[in-house]
Amino acid sequence: MKFIEIIEAIRTNTIYEFLEENSINIKYESIDVYAENYIDEDSKFCFLDIKEADRKKTFEWNGITYENLYTLTKLVDIVNDLIKQDPKMTSVGIIYEILDNILNGE
């Protein structure tokens, strides 16, 4: 799934429906969000069970490196905080803000 799809689902308060539509059978509170290869606005993302991923920042599986973005609950909090700061912020703006925060070590 794409980063923009995840952010849109959070922005529109449809994350539970998004999880169901994408057959994610992990408890909401137990989801870690990982990017394939590297974290970027165009990266493919996947959801893994926190226990399955063992809270690793990066790991390799089937020749693909996965990099942890955040837990889903933290990502939802970050997106909601950004929207509170600027209700007109677009999903793309939110993505760039998150990427900027990661680059700056926040």
Image: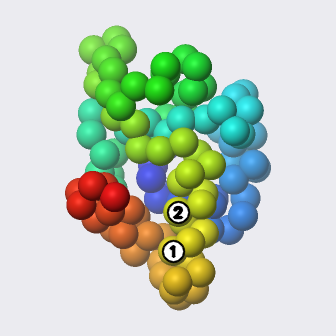
Classify mark 2: residues with Cα within 10 Å, few (<14), some (14-19) or many (20+): some
Colouring scheme applied when the structure was drawn? rainbow
Q: Is residue 93 left or right of residue 54?
A: left
Residue located 62% across and 49% down the image:
73
Residue 36: in sight, yes or no? Answer: no
Q: Looking at the image, how many numbered discs can be counted on the residues?
A: 2
- Identify which amino acid the numbered label 2 is placed on: Ile
Seen at 49% across and 35% down, the residue is 46
Residue 100 in percent (x, y) is at: 28, 65
Quarter of the image where one finds residue 47: top right
Q: CA distance from mark 2 to mark 1?
A: 6 Å
Q: Is residue 102 left or right of residue 22?
A: left
Looking at the image, which is closer to me, 104 or 100? 104
User: Residue 45 falls in which quadrant of the image?
Assistant: top left
- Residue drawn 53% across and 63% down? 78
Q: Position of residue 65 (x, y in %)?
A: 29, 25
Question: Can see residue 79?
Answer: yes
Report x, y in % for residue 6.
Answer: 55, 53
Q: Amino acid at mark 1?
A: Leu
Pick the quarter of the image with the C terminus.
Answer: bottom left
Farthest residue in the front direction? 106
Seen at 38% across and 62% down, the residue is 98
Q: Is residue 57 above or below residue 81?
A: above
> Which SS class for mark 1?
helix
- Disc number at residue 82? 1
Residue at label 2? 78
Residue 38 screen position, x and y as percent:
27, 40
2 and 1 marks in contact (CB < 8 Å): yes
Q: Is residue 53 above or below residue 35?
A: above
